[in-house]
Amino acid sequence: MKNREKIKKLILEDLRTAPVIQLSCDRAGVSRATFYRMKKSDKKFAQAADEALLEGRMTINDLAESRLMAAIQSGNLTSVMYWLNHNHSQYSNKLEIKGELTTKHELSEAQEADIKRALSLIKLKEASDGE
């Protein structure tokens, strides 16, 4: 049992820096299926794993943003364009869609027959209730 807790701890530590489940499982010496079984059977671990994955993603995002800033500072035009495209409304891609939408409701023969049958049953019920 202690071994399983040690494995969980290793996985959580690894996910905080490299948010890739397969890599974390490989480093902890367990299969991906084992990870998901542990997650399913232990709600506390499941929550901790989700938090560790989020923390890891945020770490990678910070790393990527710092590399992007370095590329911009070094004059990399692709990086400059990427930044402006995603962070400045004047430079962002715009997509405008115009058109009209019309709908046509048609019933199949079977649907029409079902409706007629339902209406006739209602009329029969109303007639019997009125007597």
Image (tube, rainbow, N blue to C red):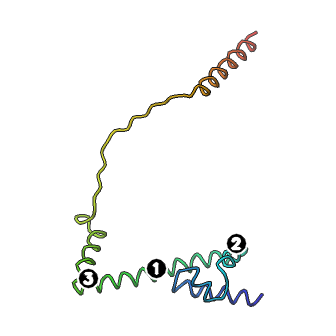
Q: Residue furthest top?
A: 131
Q: Nearer the viewer, residue 22 or 94?
A: 22
Residue occupying the point 74% across, 15% down = 129
Q: Residue furthest right?
A: 1
Q: Residue furthest front?
A: 109
Q: Where residue 60 appears, x then y in whole percent?
A: 44, 82
Q: Earlier in the sequence, mark 3 or mark 1?
A: 1
Q: Are marks 3 and 2 in contact (CB under 8 Å)?
A: no
Q: Is residue 88 left or right of residue 56?
A: left
Q: Where residue 70 appears, x then y in whole percent?
A: 29, 86
Quarter of the picture containing the C terminus is top right
- Give the Cα distance between marks 3 and 1: 21 Å
Q: Nearer the viewer, residue 51 or 79?
A: 79
Question: In the rendering, which numbered label is found on residue 131?
Answer: none
Label 3 crowd (10 A; few <14 / some 14-19 / many >=20): some
Residue occupying the point 73% across, 11% down = 130
- Give the Cα distance between marks 2 and 1: 24 Å
Q: Are marks 2 and 1 in contact (CB under 8 Å)?
A: no
The amino acid type found where label 3 is placed reads Ile
Quadrant hosting residue 41: bottom right
Q: Earlier in the sequence, mark 3 or mark 2?
A: 2
Residue at label 1? 58
Q: Is residue 7 left or right of residue 23?
A: right
Q: Where residue 87 appears, x then y in whole percent?
A: 29, 70
In the structure shown, which secondary structural element does the residue marked by tag 1 occupy?
A: helix
Nearer to us: label 2 or label 1? 2
Residue at label 3? 72
Residue at label 2? 40
The amino acid type found where label 1 is placed reads Met
